[in-house]
Image (cartoon, rainbow, N blue to C red):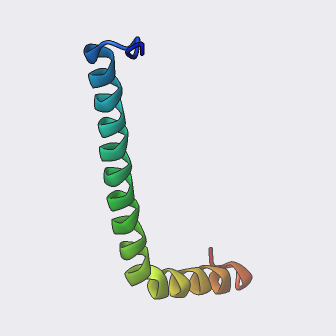
C-alpha cells in the first residue's frame, strides 16, 4: 500500500487555515450578535424618531 503524498507541513497548514476561518466566523457571529442586541434595545426609539421626522416633514418644519 502507498502512503499519502501530502507532507505533514502541508496538513498542518491546512488545519491552521481551517482553525483561522473557524475563529473568524466565531468573531463575526459575536459581532453580529452584539449589533442585533443593540438594535433590539434601540428599535422602539428608532421608530419614535422616524415618526417624529415624518410628522415634521409633513408639517414643513424640517
Question: Residue at the location (35% across, 45% down)?
Answer: 22
Residue 10 in picture, x, y percent from top left:
33, 16
Is residue 49 left or right of 35 when viewed as pictured? right
Q: How many labels does the image show?
A: 0
Above or below residue 21? Residue 4 is above
Residue found farthest to the right: 58
User: Could you tell me which quadrant the N terminus lies in?
Assistant: top left
Above or below residue 30? Residue 8 is above
Residue 59 in picture, x, y percent from top left:
70, 85
Residue 8 in picture, x, y percent from top left:
26, 17
Residue 41 or residue 7, whichever sits in front = 7
Is residue 50 left or right of 32 when viewed as pictured? right
Image-quadrant location for residue 58: bottom right
Question: Residue at the location (40% across, 61% down)?
Answer: 32
Above or below residue 12? Residue 46 is below
Residue 5 or residue 19, whichever sits in front = 5
Question: Residue at the location (27% across, 24% down)?
Answer: 12
Image-quadrant location for residue 4: top left
Residue 52 in picture, x, y percent from top left:
57, 85
Amino acid at each position: 500500500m502507498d502512503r499519502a503524498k501530502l507532507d505533514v507541513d502541508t496538513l498542518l497548514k491546512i488545519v491552521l487555515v481551517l482553525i483561522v476561518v473557524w475563529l473568524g466566523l466565531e468573531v463575526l457571529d459575536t459581532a453580529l450578535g452584539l449589533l442585533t442586541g443593540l438594535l433590539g434595545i434601540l428599535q422602539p426609539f428608532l421608530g419614535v424618531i422616524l415618526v417624529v421626522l415624518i410628522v415634521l416633514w409633513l408639517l414643513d418644519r424640517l
